[in-house]
Image: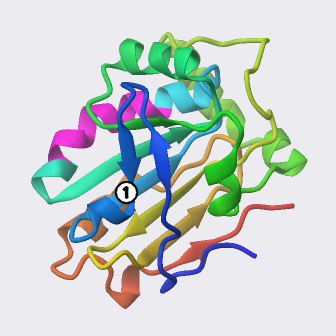
Amino acid sequence: MRIMVGERAPDFTATAVDGSSISLSALKGQRVWLAFYRFAACPFCNLRIHEVAQRTAGFMAQGVRVLAVFQSSREKVQEVQDRHKVPFPVLCDPHGDLYKLYRLEESVLAAMSPANLPRLLEARREGMPITTRPDGPVTRVPADFLIDAAGVVRVAFYGKAISEHIPFVDVERWASSPRAGNASMSETRAAPT
């Protein structure tokens, strides 16, 4: 069963690439965008985290903390952080514990989706690494969670393709909302199985 809007976000403590320990409960009182990526060698994830890194200042100005999770080793995630100069904590979860906690899925259909091709071409144009040696599950589907200051999930976005994350316009609308989680923004999207 997927995480649903209105549920309390499952608490966790994880190690960031810089060695610091991050607990979701320690961020209570702050709004959090928790973004689950696939693995460090994923071209889609490298493109997306590059795009998020470029927009982070705007989200921070609206009081939103960004946390990213990769199912890769600390060494591999460090390469991503260095390559894209990521200005927010990137958590390493090589064993997939947080992925299980937040009920992320794997899907062959999502991996084979035609929606992946345009993002792959865009990643290539942007010079993102295209690898034949994945360091994580190739069928892993990304997800994004927008969590309010009380620790309640206000948006649960499960991708339909391995290249899909929550649209920036949805995050921006949520971040600029006075309550940052009104009913019109609450949704749960399911990935195909």
Which quarter of the rendered picture does the C terminus lie within?
A: bottom right
Residue named by callout 1: 33
Tell me if residue 57 comes above or below residue 122 in the rendering: below
Type of amino acid at the residue the image marks with label 1:
Trp
Q: Quadrant of residue 33?
A: bottom left
Q: Foreground: 180 or 74?
A: 74
- Where is residue 133 shown, x and y percent of the image? 78, 13
Q: Foreground: 6 or 110?
A: 6
Describe the colour scheme in one phrase: rainbow
Q: Which residues are magenta?
A: 48-58
Q: Quadrant of residue 94?
A: top right
- Where is residue 170 shown, x and y percent of the image? 38, 64
Residue lying farthest to the left in this orientation: 61
Residue at (38, 47) in percent of width and height: 22
Which quarter of the rendered picture does the N terminus lie within?
A: bottom right
Residue at (25, 40) in percent of width and height: 55
Residue 53 included in the magenta stretch of the image: yes
- Where is residue 164 shown, x and y percent of the image? 60, 47
Tell me if residue 114 comes above or below residue 183 in the rendering: above
* Magenta stretch prevailing secondary structure: helix
Residue at (44, 54) in percent of width and height: 34
Secondary structure state at the residue bearing disc 1: strand
Residue 125 included in the magenta stretch of the image: no
- Where is residue 191 shown, x and y percent of the image? 73, 61
Residue at (21, 71) in percent of width and height: 29
